[in-house]
Image: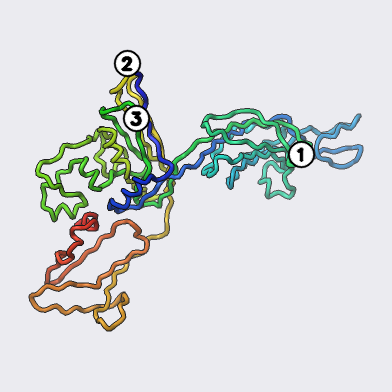
């Protein structure tokens, strides 16, 4: 039998035309976000050898202090040594290592992570310098650091670590520089998003594929470390879930954001949950056909926590070994999310426009407004307006109370049959 091929999970680099058209046709309560591909570079600064001596020693022949070892015959001189530290620079990111004092062969064995790297063709620069004050900040001391040499390293996009020795070079050609440095560099492409704390976004571009799955079912695992993931609540996904809401009253179905079906029999579910239920889950496991699961993740919602943190959303697909030999195989991808704390929440405002037709229609706040309604008749309380500058696409709660009469939304006309009513909860 043919060998089973592993499925793959990835993020499309940009929104496709079909995805853009679906965004215009699907009502949603949260904003769209398409991950951006950035680079994450891991640098291991291991050691250096044969650096230039830059310590001050006393030359009795000249009767003064000179930098470096002085090979004067017949006179004792100081030890050849340097207090070396390294500066690692990539694009606008700059990191400094610790200072190793009193040696020409420093050993750091330090690891650094540089993120985000926007241009994969950038060069990593490692500059070695000497400081006369190893116990202090080199750039806060009286004497400026002394240049020992540098190397410029191109990034290897194969995502394999490159560990090798590099000969130090000067800033200008022909400069007297000696020594070598050992550096290990690994470049990794990362799908990246930034989300404000407490917000919900729909992650675009998530894609799963399998060349030989055919009509067999696959297993999809979706999880987040700190936030939650939720399946979209549009008509297409509700049809796949076969929610039994069509058995209820049409008016009640319109208030719960789920669609009403035009047939009498309940449709069979197109997928099943092994873990979670698709509503604010830290992790969910779903099984079904590949096209149906692709429809689920095409508008997957991510609910950010209410604090700043570095989060990761993981998508893993398992073909369950239905086709070919070799057993079950898996494919996975990740989306790195930076959850940042936004500004303080601003209170919403409630206003009512004046009724007079001859007056300018401007909102008024903090004013008691009167409406005259004939006894026993119905009237529309037009002119009500709510505003919240930082609600964005989030939901708000409105409470309306009548002391003697009754309130109704029946007079809203097409509103109760539109997408806004389907997104509202009563």
Among the two numbered marks 1 and 2 on one chain, the one whose residue lies closer to the N terminus: 2
Residue 378 found in image quarter: bottom left
Q: Which residue is disc 3 drawn over?
A: 210
Among the two numbered marks 3 and 1 on one chain, the one whose residue lies closer to the N terminus: 1
| Quarter the C terminus occupies | bottom left
* Label 1 secondary element: loop
Is 216 left, or right, of 42 in this rendering?
Answer: left
- 131 or 274: which is nearer to us? 274
Residue 224 found in image quarter: top left
Instruction: Give the residue at x 32% y 66%.
Output: 387
Q: Which residue is disc 2 drawn over?
A: 1
Whole-percent x and y of residue 402? 16, 70
- 87 or 187: which is nearer to us? 187
Among the two numbered marks 2 and 3 on one chain, the one whose residue lies closer to the N terminus: 2
Q: Which of the labelled discs sits on residue 173, or is there none?
A: 1
Q: Is residue 74 above or below residue 119?
A: above
Q: CA distance from mark 3 to mark 1?
A: 53 Å
* Of the two numbered discs 1 and 2 in the rendering, the one whose residue sits closer to the viewer: 2
Is 297 left, or right, of 100 in this rendering?
Answer: left
Instruction: Give the residue at x 40% y 52%.
Output: 196
Which residue appears farthest toward the front when viewing the image?
17
Q: Is residue 283 above or below residue 399?
A: above
Q: CA distance from mark 2 to mark 3?
A: 17 Å
């Amino acid at each position: 039998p043919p060998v089973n091929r592993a499925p793959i999970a990835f993020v499309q680099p940009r929104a496709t035309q079909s995805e853009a058209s679906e965004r215009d046709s699907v009502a949603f309560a949260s904003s769209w976000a398409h991950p951006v591909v950035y680079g994450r570079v891991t640098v291991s600064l291991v050691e250096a050898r044969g650096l230039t001596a830059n310590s001050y020693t006393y030359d009795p022949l000249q009767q003064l202090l000179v930098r470096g070892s002085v090979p004067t015959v017949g006179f004792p001189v100081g030890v050849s040594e340097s207090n070396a530290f390294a500066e690692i620079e990539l694009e606008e990111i700059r990191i400094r290592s610790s200072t190793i004092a009193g040696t020409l062969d420093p050993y750091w064995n330090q690891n650094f992570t540089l993120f985000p790297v926007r241009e994969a063709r950038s060069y990593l620069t490692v500059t070695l310098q000497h400081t006369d004050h190893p116990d202090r900040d080199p750039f806060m001391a009286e004497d400026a650091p002394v240049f020992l040499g540098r190397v410029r390293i191109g990034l290897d996009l194969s995502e394999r670590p490159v560990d090798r020795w590099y000969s130090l070079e000067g800033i200008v050609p022909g400069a007297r520089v000696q020594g070598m440095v050992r550096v290990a560099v690994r470049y990794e492409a990362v799908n990246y998003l930034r989300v404000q704390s407490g917000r919900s976004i729909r992650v675009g571009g998530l894609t799963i594929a399998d060349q030989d799955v055919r009509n067999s079912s696959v297993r999809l695992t979706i999880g987040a470390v700190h936030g939650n993931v939720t399946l979209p609540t549009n008509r297409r996904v509700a049809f796949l879930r076969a929610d039994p809401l069509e058995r209820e009253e049409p008016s009640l179905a319109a208030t719960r954001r789920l669609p009403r079906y035009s047939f009498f029999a309940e449709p069979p579910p197109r997928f099943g949950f092994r873990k979670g239920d698709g509503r604010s889950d830290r992790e969910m496991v779903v099984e079904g056909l590949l096209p149906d699961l692709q429809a689920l993740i095409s508008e997957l919602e991510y609910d950010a926590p209410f604090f700043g943190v570095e989060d990761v959303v993981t998508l893993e697909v398992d073909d369950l070994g239905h086709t070919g030999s070799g057993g079950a195989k898996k494919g996975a991808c990740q989306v790195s999310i930076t959850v940042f704390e936004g500004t303080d929440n601003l209170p919403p405002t409630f206003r009512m426009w004046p009724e007079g037709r001859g007056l300018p229609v401007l909102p008024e706040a903090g004013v008691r407004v009167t409406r005259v309604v004939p006894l026993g008749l119905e009237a529309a309380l037009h002119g009500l307006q709510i505003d919240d500058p930082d609600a964005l696409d989030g939901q708000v709660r409105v409470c309306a109370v009548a002391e003697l009469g009754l309130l109704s939304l029946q007079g809203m006309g097409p509103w109760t049959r539109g997408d806004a009513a389907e997104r509202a909860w009563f």
